[in-house]
Image (cartoon, grey):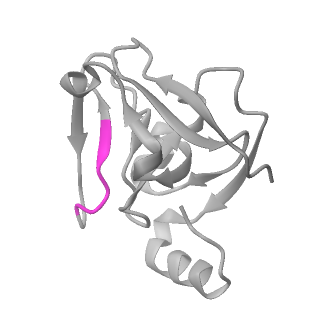
Amino acid sequence: MDHDMIIHNGGCHCRRVRWQVRAPKSVVAWKCNCSDCSMRGNIHFSVPSERFELLGVSKEFLTTYTFGTHTAKHTFCKVCGITSFYISQSNPDDVSVTFRCVDSGTLSHVEIKEFDGRNWESSYNSMKQTNEEPK
């Protein structure tokens, strides 16, 4: 895994929401099967919030959906509806970036791992016991 951080730019489909994130060229992304992620086809990688920055007037075009525990903040563009990033239930201090919303050219490798979000609590606890970081 490449641990050298670079700047990745990205955002939503209509480009009203734009951001940059400092992350390696090679990332581990999580494919979750919870009710929300499976409907959206979301696959994401997480970074500490201090390595994520919204650009320009992006905040004006964001809205948020929550459900269940209301810990996860599913943020999406009010215009095109794309969730290019959000706050996950498992890591509320991080920002989860939808890897397909990263502009092309900076991610050299994406390893996709599965997370059983339909059985969130047992999956999360199991991963914590094996010291694998669920994101």
The structure residue drawn at horizontal position 35% and vertical position 24%, both measured from the top left corner, is 55
Residue 100 at x, y percent in the picture = 59, 30
Asked whether 8 or 97 is in front, the reply is: 8
Q: Main secondary structure of the magenta part?
A: loop
Q: Which quadrant, please, contains the N terminus?
A: bottom right
Question: In the rendered view, does 20 fall on the left or right side of 68?
Answer: right
Extreme top residue here? 14
The structure residue drawn at horizontal position 40% and vertical position 51%, both measured from the top left corner, is 49
Q: Is residue 61 magenta?
A: no
Vertical order, 24 against 120 (above or below) = above
Question: In the rendered view, does 110 fall on the left or right side of 42?
Answer: right
Extreme bottom residue here? 129
Residue 135 at x, y percent in the picture = 53, 61
The structure residue drawn at horizontal position 36% and vertical position 62%, both measured from the top left corner, is 92
The structure residue drawn at horizontal position 59% and vertical position 36%, both measured from the top left corner, is 99
| Magenta part of the chain | 70-75
Residue 17 at x, y percent in the picture = 35, 22
Asked whether 135 or 7 is in front, the reply is: 7
Q: Is residue 72 magenta?
A: yes
Total residue callouts: 0
Residue 124 at x, y percent in the picture = 51, 76
Vertical order, 107 against 38 (above or below) = above
Question: In the rendered view, does 22 fall on the left or right side of 95?
Answer: right
